[in-house]
Image (spheres, helix red, strand yellow):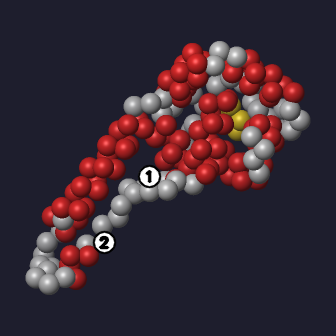
């Protein structure tokens, strides 16, 4: 499975918002400038996060984005689903119905061993992402790189939107 680069951008942007000075809204232009990302495309990702209730959007000259809830209540899976959608990575099209000996009365999504294995793998992947919050990542980064919160807040203050 390959996720869009928007997932990486959204995850890093959400993490950076945890260090926003005084929990201020950060304009989309500043968020994009932080990693030299195309503002229009990052804004599209931010709007998807807003629709999912992960960030809030404040319009106007002092507007921008901020986290809608605490980082301990935002999982990596929340962000991935907001950007990529909730569909399973593998979609069983019941190919076995077209093979020799096919039984039209069988739900091959349930009977197919490949479909079952892929579903278990998808569930394991989702469980792993659901078990990691932005707060977990934030704590890990702050432990390994203590200057990051201050540097991020300073950069948001220094960047032009």
Label 1's element?
Answer: loop
Give residue 101's quadrant in the image: bottom left
Please give left or right for residue 76 compared with residue 20 in the image.
left
Query: Who's the residue at 67% across and 30% down the image?
Result: 16
- Image depth: mark 2 or mark 1 in front: 2
Query: Who's the residue at 48% across and 29% down the image?
Result: 133
Q: Residues within 10 Å of mark 2 (few under 14, many from 20)?
A: few
Give residue 97's quadrant in the image: bottom left
Query: Who's the residue at 38% across and 56% down the image?
Result: 88
Quarter of the rendering occupied by the C terminus: top right
Please give left or right for residue 70 compared with residue 77 in the image.
right
Label 2's element?
Answer: loop
Expressed as whole percent of the image width and height from the top left, the position of residue 42 reads 71, 48
Expressed as whole percent of the image width and height from the top left, the position of residue 152 reads 74, 25
Q: Is residue 76 visible?
A: yes
- Residue nearest the viewer, comparing 133 with 113: 113
Q: Is residue 58 above or below residue 107?
A: above
Q: Which residue is mark 1?
A: 86
Q: Which residue is mark 2?
A: 93
Query: Who's the residue at 69% across and 21% down the image?
Result: 148
- Residue nearest the viewer, comparing 151 with 18: 151
Quarter of the rendering occupied by the N terminus: bottom left
Expressed as whole percent of the image width and height from the top left, the position of residue 63 reads 80, 35
Q: Are marks 2 and 1 in contact (CB under 8 Å)?
A: no
Whole-number angstrom distance, CA of label 2 to CA of label 1: 18 Å
Please give left or right for residue 94 compared with residue 87 in the image.
left
Q: Farthest front residue?
A: 144
Q: Is residue 59 visible?
A: no
């Amino acid at each position: 499975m390959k996720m869009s680069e928007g997932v990486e951008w959204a995850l890093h942007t959400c993490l950076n918002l945890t260090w926003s000075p005084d929990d201020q809204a950060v304009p989309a232009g500043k968020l994009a400038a932080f990693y030299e990302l195309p503002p229009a495309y990052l804004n599209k990702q931010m709007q998807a996060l807003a629709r999912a209730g992960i960030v809030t959007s404040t319009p106007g000259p002092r507007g921008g984005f901020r986290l809608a809830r605490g980082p301990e209540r935002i999982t990596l899976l929340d962000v991935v689903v907001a950007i990529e959608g909730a569909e399973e990575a593998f979609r069983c099209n019941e190919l076995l119905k077209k093979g020799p000996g096919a039984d039209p009365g069988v739900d091959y999504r349930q009977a197919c061993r490949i479909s079952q294995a892929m579903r278990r793998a998808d569930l394991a992947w989702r469980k792993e992402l659901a078990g990691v919050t932005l707060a977990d990542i934030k704590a890990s980064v702050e432990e390994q790189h203590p200057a990051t919160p201050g540097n991020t807040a300073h950069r948001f203050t220094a960047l032009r939107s």
